[in-house]
Image: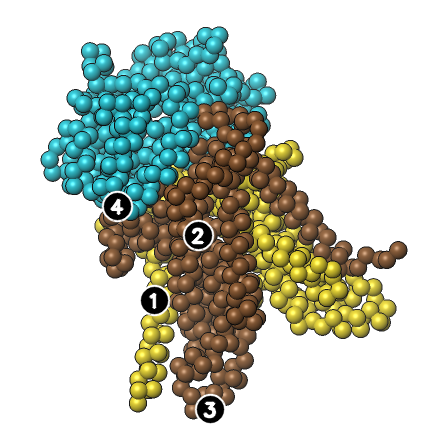
Chain colours: A yellow, B brown, C cyan
Amino acid sequence: MIGAALDLAGRVAARVAVLAAVAFLLVPLLVACLMSFDDRSFLGPFPPRDFSLRWYRAFLDNPAYTDGLFVSLQLGVIAAAIATAVGLAAALALADPRLPGREAMEAAFLSPKFIPTVVIGFSLLVFTARLGIYEPMTRLILGHVVITLPFTLRAVAASLIGVKRSQVEAAMSLGASEFRALWDVAVPAARSGIVAGAAMAFVLSFDEVAVSLFLSDAFTQTLPIALVAEMRANLNLTIAAVSTVFLAATVVLLVLLDRTIGIERLAGDVGARG
Amino acid sequence: MRRIPVALWLAAPGLLLLLALMGGPVVLLVLESLKPFVPGSIRPGEGVTLGNYTELLAPAYLFYFQETFRFGIIVAGLSVLFGAPLAFAAVRSRSALLRKLLLALLVGLLVMSLIARLYAIEMAWGSLGPLAPLGALTGIAPRSPRYAEVQVAIGLLHFTMPVVALMLVGTFRALPPRLEEAAASLGARRSDVVVSVVLPLAAPGLVSAFLVALAMCISNFVVPLILGRGIVTLATSLMYTRFADIGNYPSGAAIGVVMLVLAFAVVYGLSALARRVLPGARL
Amino acid sequence: MSITLGRRELVGALGAAMAAAGGGPVFAQPRGEQLLVVMWGAQWIEVCRPIGEEWMRRTGDRIQWELHAGGAMAVVGRLRPIWPRIQQNLIAAWDPVFDAMMEAGWMEPVDEDEMPALKEIPDIFFKKDAQGRKMTVPLSTAGAFWGYRTDLVDRPVESVEQLLEPRFRGKLCVPVPVNLSGLLLVSLAMQRGGNERNIEPGWQLLTELARRGNIGRVVANNSEMISAMSAGDLSVAFWNTGGWQAVRDRFPSRLLTRLTDNKGFLFNEGFAVMKGENRARIAAAKRFANHFATAEINTRYNMPLGSGPTNRSATASPAIADIFYRPDELDRFAYIPDYAYMATQVDGWTRRWEQEITPLIRRA
């Protein structure tokens, strides 16, 4: 009897926790959505009384956002491509039990994850200036490759777990070189990890702030930096409009992803990145 | 001559990249942190000093470092506490639609700009927002200065929870459902199954998720910048002030080096501890 | 009010008019210089964007705006590691920042042959280098004052001492010490008999305010101040005239410009022309800065900022009469501290703030 009551209480508590978590994650976005139609010139009390599209107009009129979007897309694709290629190679290396110093190498590869990104950003700024690299896109790519590498490596490594060394060796015994054997046996097996790693790298790069803050310049700004710069200097409800546009774009993207890859699979791959 | 193993060739690009783009800058950072700072001047001073480090021993700075970890531990804990049921529902709910919607929410949040989310939090939870009365349940009035702490915690939680939940989706999916089915077929109640079968098996995953959330909180600086009202100062905000506002690079570099050492010590220390208690926990 | 139109501007205007009339494509315009101009956010950029757009149509030059993230001093720190490879051509700044950039040798001297509008600006507004050359393009006389929203404060405030009262618990909005280069501290020091060189009394008063929990918000830029004072949680602030003007436009407010036991602070804002390799670009930057110094644009620029124009022929907004002083009042109510000295103290003040004040605000 008591067991049944406890069971019920447990189930109710779990439901409440799920509901609370969902509300916690969603409600602010819905509030911002409503505020984006506010006609007041400042951030006043909720809810708005008069509505207008002025913040959407302000958003469209400011080229900083569209320019930033273009820079961010470009940067995300390039950085993700490099980080995925390098991460794939490193993961294949780490999967080989004969590699000397494997543990230490793995720790080194994962270490950028735990360095505060402000530190990476600032020290890379000083470092690239010392080397004479001033081109902002180059600097941004370097920074973003460093911070995304651990994630692509991890995702590929997770998908390589099922590949047995003996399979690679079998291919080699048939006359393939080791490179060839890895390429033919291990890489296809790691495909889902490669896709997930690349997607993760792109998302991380697209939303990165601290590193980009130091490595951007006035003419080459990523979208998050344009947002921070505009909102810190000029806080207004344009950010609510931006948030709503993002929300809409995300929903469209999710529907597309679900039709193509499938949300379940995608979430599984992304989730395995730990 | 022995041939260089292929694995080394494969590891080389990554290692060189890290050596150049992380090793180099970190060495420069350490060197910078040993320079004296000349106030009011744009040029760096001459000589070598440890002053930038000894200054950080002042009680106020210890307080900021302690605060950084306090926020990190509380938020990472809450993140796992709420992220775990969320992830479990997303994996094991009987309704396929619910599973899909929950996963879509988590992936969607990962894609959505953090900056936009933080300003949305300010609008929703700020003193003028509709959720302010809920925030007041913490015992801190939304109009009082200390409410900034609540806002920063909410911001960090919003930042970490989707990541934690997605990691746990991976963890729960990896658990063989047969075990749960077996337990259930033996007459165990669902909540018993969760407590006695699922939780112990998922423990390493929960620990990893906690550590990742902790690391995310410690190194984040946008959250206090946007939601801290100038009152919540975490270690990264101190660093940013020095780099960006007062141009005191040596001192900023010293804080950076300390953060680096602390972050590694805590994360690797905790994960070593976790490995000892729960074999299989990894970062 | 006189508008001087140079030959180049005339040609540009004609070109723009012709392009507009014929609906000509954009690339038919003469290709101009690309300028990067650093400006403050909020009303500063609001008033500058249209001025810049008209200028672009007229001259074919391209103006790209960059915004100061916090105080103008931050830009100095940010440019240091990459100097001299900076892209900025004009930086909007004020006294202490001018001093810091002059000390570093980053600024280009300006003269009246290249920039005729400078003739209409009184000599005292300029900063000069050791050789007596003019180094800045002064655009405004602005100030920093205590003030409050009269709709939120029950009894009038006549002295900074009153801010210690319990009714102001959590009600004060103050700048971080970097901002306004520490004028807040100077003001508090003067309240207790000190000044910028004798700042200790200021720390004591600040400590008291923080300990009583009266400091509700610490803001880092104009935009934050304006939002904070618009939200209604806070009623009193120490801030510059530009931020106050935006608050006054929305809510009944009173600026404490004539305190018997304290002073208001005055300073100049304007443009610094940055050094660079490209002479043509520097010349274009000077033409654009000169445009701001002309009476017409100087009037238009200062109107929404609540600051006083520097051009003799410009008109000041009638709304700001109360915040500016008659000559006989200057000594009694206003003070111009040694900004160059303050610029050297900001680093130390910031660290002391972190060590002593922030923890107090949190614990109060």
Residue at image position (50%, 56%) is: B266
Q: Is residue C123 left or right of residue C163?
A: right
Q: Nearer the viewer, mark 4 or mark 1?
A: 4
Quadrant for the N terminus of chain B in the image: bottom right
How far across and how far down the image is residue A143, in percent? 59, 45
User: Residue A214: horizontal and vertical position, in percent?
Assistant: 52, 39
Are both tags, 1 and 3, on one chain? no
Task: Work out whether residue C303 or residue B8 is closer to the camera in this orientation and state it.
Answer: B8
| Mark 1 closeness class: few <14, some 14–19, many ≥20 residues within 10 Å | some
- Label 4: which secondary element: loop
Toward the right, the furthest residue is: B1
Q: CA distance from mark 3 to mark 4?
A: 58 Å
| Local secondary structure at mark 3 | helix
Q: Residue at x 80, y 73 (%)?
A: A170
Give the CA separation, mark 3 to mark 2.
Answer: 44 Å
* C308 on left or right of B69: left
The residue to which callout 4 is attached is: C364
What residue would you read off at disc 1? A20
Q: Which residue is mark 2?
A: B114
Which chain hosts label 4? C
| Quadrant of the image containing the C terminus of chain B | bottom right
- What residue type is disc 2 on? Leu
Q: Which residue is mark 3?
A: B185
Mark 3 packing: few (<14 Cα in 10 Å), some, or many (20+)?
few
Do callouts 1 and 2 point to residues on the same chain? no
The quarter of the picture where residue C343 lies is top left
N-terminal of the pair, mark 3 or mark 2, is: 2
- Of badges 2 and 4, the one in the foreground is 4
Residue A86 at least partly seen: yes
Farthest bottom residue in view: B186
